[in-house]
Amino acid sequence: MQVLGIETSCDETGIALYDGERGLLAHALHSQVALHARYGGVVPELASRDHIQRTIPLIREVLAEANSDETKIGGIAYTAGPGLVGALLVGAAVGRSLALAWDIPAVAVHHMEAHLLAPMLEPDPPDFPFVALLVSGGHTLLIEVEAVGHYTLLGESLDDAVGEAFDKTAKLLGLDYPGGPALAKLATQGQPGRFHFPRPMTDRPGLDFSFSGIKTHAMNTIRKAPSDPQTRADIARGFEDAVVDTLRIKCKRALEQSGARALVVGGGVGANQRLRAALAGLAEKTGTRVYFPRAEFCTDNGAMVAYAGYRRLQAGEAVGAGFSVRPRWSLDMLRPPTRPTR
Ligand code: KG4
Ligand code: ZN
């Protein structure tokens, strides 16, 4: 079965076509970074308007690249949440309408489930069960995963998400939106150890996170320190090391607590090289394995939505003729794929 995936939850329009037998056939992405850059963050109304303009042309592009058309597509997967309500509505409306017009089923995909399953698109995919670390702009989650839809929340951020902490600290350092990759780049020039940042909530048991303290620490450090380029790079390095170390400590704990032998990483911050190296080191030391999506599938994309939708459509799940979006939608509310009730 070929599944068309549509991702429009935030500031990227992602479209992909996934085939159950042949794997990923084609994917395309339009990033709105340039559109939002001068505002220093995502402007929801501009995001929705841009998704409206991009979605259909990108679908055409992907179908042409895969040499496919509506006669070959067996289902449509669209991100229904969590995310920006107006942005989500674009993908949901387009996806649901195409499914009606083409007389095929549609499925509503949870954006974080899509991130969680993204490593399954790689040549050496993980087996269930595993622990997932999901680190994006809006979420920091540690999850015990038994199967698709069997999720137990082990820990989450009590305040800022990791990506948010990266973005806010980057802004304080005078870097452009989106700050995460820019801060990581600056940190490569930094000297480790010159600035020490706290590792929040690692000195007590538990798997929850808190990143707002690190951000405040960054603010105070930046205010007091000289503003030369080397100092800024050293601060970026101190911040990144503290975040990566905190995530590594909590992942180690989650693996021990759950007894799982595999760790799966998803979400935009999963593209961070220092995090990838730290978690690879953890896996080597503990005799476990770590799985990452390729960097372009860590950040938002249509491929992960097509894949997550495929897993649910294949098991018979589909939404009814109407559709709705869920801007706030907790991952542990998800259930295994189900057949429609009507
Ligand atoms: O998953 P994602 O693309 O969108 C959401 O679902 O939120 O994640 C975006 C987040 C942003 O906060 C961005 O700054 C961060 O991921 N990010 C990074 C890196 N690449 C993206 N943070 C640190 N290092 C990176 N290389
Ligand atoms: Zn995301």
Image (cartoon, rainbow, N blue to C red):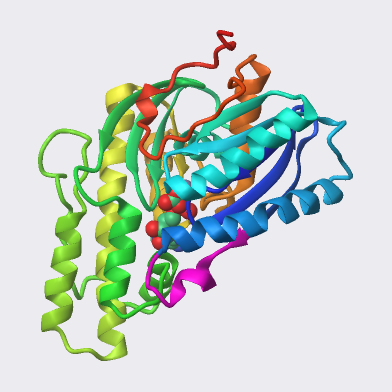
Say whether residue 312 is left or right of residue 240. right
Residue 53 location (% of width, % of height): 65, 59
Residue 14 visible from this viewpoint: yes
User: What residue is drawn where x is 30% and y is 86%?
Assistant: 230
Question: Depth check: 315 or 52 in front?
Answer: 52
Q: Quadrant of the N terminus?
A: top right
Say whether residue 41 is left or right of residue 203. right
Q: Quadrant of the C terminus?
A: top right
**What is the quadrant of residue 302 in the picture?**
top right
- Does 298 appear in magenta? no
* Vertical position of residue 214 compared to residue 85: above or below: below
- Does 31 appear in magenta? yes
Question: Depth check: 290 or 297 in front?
Answer: 297
Question: Depth check: 150 or 79 in front?
Answer: 79
**What is the quadrant of residue 98 in the picture?**
top right
Question: Depth check: 135 or 186 in front?
Answer: 135
Residue 222 location (% of width, % of height): 18, 78
Say whether residue 79 is left or right of residue 313. left
* Vertical position of residue 125 compared to residue 340: above or below: below
**What is the quadrant of residue 153 in the picture?**
top left
User: What residue is drawn where x is 42% and y is 72%?
Assistant: 182
Residue 270 visible from this viewpoint: no
Q: Look at the image and give the residue range highlighted in magenta.
A: 29-41
